Image: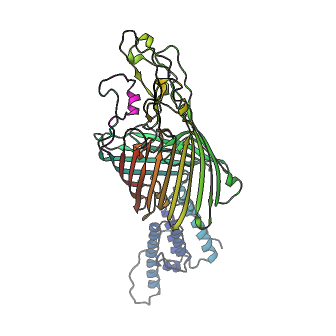
Amino acid sequence: MSVRLKGRPVSRTLGASVAVVTLLWCTPSLAQEAAVTPTARSDSAMVNLVRLLVEQGVLTRDKGDALMAQAQAEATQVRAAQAQAAAPSGVAVAALPPPPAGTVRVPYVPETVRAQIKEELRNEVLAQAKEEHWAAPGEAAPDWVRNVRLTGDLRLRSVSDLYAKTNSNQIVDVPAFNATGPHDITSKAPFAVPLLNATNNRLSKFQSRARIGIEATVAERFQLGFQLATGDDAGPISTNATMMGGLRKRDLWLQLAYAKGEIIPGITAWVGRFDNPLTTTDLMYDPDLAFDGAAGQIDVAKILGHGDDFMFALRGGAFPLDPGDDNFPSRAFNKRNFRDRYIFSGQVEIGKTFAGGIEARLAGAYHDFTYMRGHLSDPCDVYTLDVPSTFCSTDGLIPLNPTKGNTLMFLRTFDIAQKGAAPVFEPQYFGLKYAFRVLDLNGSVTVPISAGVQAKLTGNFLYNFGVDPQNDCKEGPTGGPLTNVSGIVCGTGATGRWIGSNEAWAGYFSIGHPELFSINPRRANRGAWAINAGYKRLGSDAVPDAFTDSDFHLGGTNAKGYFIGGAWAPYKNVVLGARWLSANEIVGDPFAIDVLQLDLNLAF
């Protein structure tokens, strides 16, 4: 005998309950069993089926409870009818309502038929669940949701900048000098050039850093990512926004836009704008610095089949900085081309994990910053032309995003023959005196202490091969170094010399949860903690001052000092942090700066 339960197409979740109730009406024994609670065990196939569908997620708990309740109501009616039929004559039994129209009473359903009905019901309900997306066993979300990851973080900071009262009050503001220049260096008027604040403290400045990013997996092996971040300006090294500006709205910048993927096993490439792909410290690059261009990594250890306890990788990249002005000078018939400025970097890193989880790593890199240094211009006429229309041949070599610390030179020479009876007038720009070809050696040792707690010691040494003091006066007295010198270096009777440095070194020590060793980002489980400390000595021309740490000495080079800080997570991904940074100048006018930072970080 074959019985097939088939009605209208199941188009709503209630279809499942209709099928169950119909079957419960088919046999009184099944109806009686429907009164069992959803979690109770029963010998009824249909009761167990409903409970199983709930447990497997095909039916929600609410829908399952509704079906059970309806079955129990119908079972009550069936039991009452049976009692009335079996009652002795003369015994009054309450009248029962007639059964629903179309009800079929079957005294017995064979086990094979029950199994067939159970399978058909399950398949129909499952098909409806998938079609209407109210249940999807084995699939928590559509493919595009599983392939996309959304991240974000917010850092709220109170920062105090503390200046020594013995600091010099005549330190030139180099970025402002070039941005508002050229400035006449022969002028005797007060405030002829912009100067830095070096003596007045700034207490409890309120800053925020908000970032949100998205990364999607493409073709199962590539990642496409974007990140937006706040920032006071388009400069490369800081994404902090000062929250003091008349309640004005804040700027949002494109911080990252990249494609990354493992082309073949062991070979990975980046293109676009991405986080630092090299192993460096903040002695070389600020933690917020992002790179434009292309980079790659060859995981030699992986290609050769080594395990996770050994690493050997080669990395490299080409990062464009400035294509040069393709319309310089804008008011001249004949244009001048400038070579593109780039960073070309190559790095090799080896690492080994020893018994007990002790890990040691050593990396060596070479960074070539092309066409960064300045040169003197051809003699230019600033006397017979209006100053706004004046240009000189090397004005395009103004430094990119300078801060402070690098050795400077003048970029212009002037055609004195055109001066005539006009007063002396020398409007100048600053340029970088030296090139930057930097050797970067850094290494670390990490020692596990307990579950979730590590100690890490890191060292970093930098050496710039681009510094050439022997040729300081190659371009004449005007082209000599202006800063980081003792006296006049070039010219008749010069007795001074360059006293800057092309070296830098730093030591860092951290203990606690490794996710809190860096301030960028701060994500950790509840209760995580870390203490970080270090000492840095960053010579004037060891690296370009445009890209190094923006917190230590408030950015730039020619600084030495220490820092200490800590972080603690009272909740998951909610971190409180504090840092004290103290730095003095190495050479030149007195310029000591201490910085106190109090942070609240939230991330997802």
Q: Quadrant of residue 164?
A: top left
Give the vertical position of 376 relative to 538 (above or below). above
Q: Which of these two is toward me, 410 or 518?
A: 410
Queried whether the magenta region covers residue 174, the answer comes back as yes
| Residue 521 visible in the picture | no
Give the quadrant of the N terminus: bottom right
Is residue 384 inside the magenta stretch?
no
Q: In this orientation, which residue lies closer to the viewer: 554 or 481?
A: 481
Q: Is residue 298 left or right of residue 416?
A: right
Which one is nearer the viewer's eye here, 79 or 269?
Answer: 269
Q: Residue furthest left?
A: 246
The residue sitting at the top extreme is 420
Residue at 53% from the left image edge and 48% from the top image edge: 215
Q: Residue 294: which quarter of the image?
A: top right
Question: Does 19 sit above or below residue 257?
Answer: below
Q: Is residue 477 above or below residue 513?
A: above
| Direction from residue 199 to residue 501 in the image, left or right | right
* Identity of the residue drawn at 38% across and 86% down: 92
Question: Does the image show residue 285?
Answer: yes
Residue 239, given in percent of the width and then of the height, sits at 42, 43
x and y, in percent, of residue 347 in the image: 61, 46
Q: Which quarter shows the C terminus?
A: bottom left
**293 vs 127: above or below:** above
- Residue displayed at 65% across by 58% down: 310
Residue at x 31%, y 23% (from the top left corner): 188
Q: Position of residue 179 (x, y in %)?
A: 40, 29
Please state the total of marks drawn on the protein image.
0
Q: Which residues are magenta?
A: 164-188
Residue 536 picture location, percent across and down: 46, 49
Q: Main secondary structure of the magenta part?
A: loop
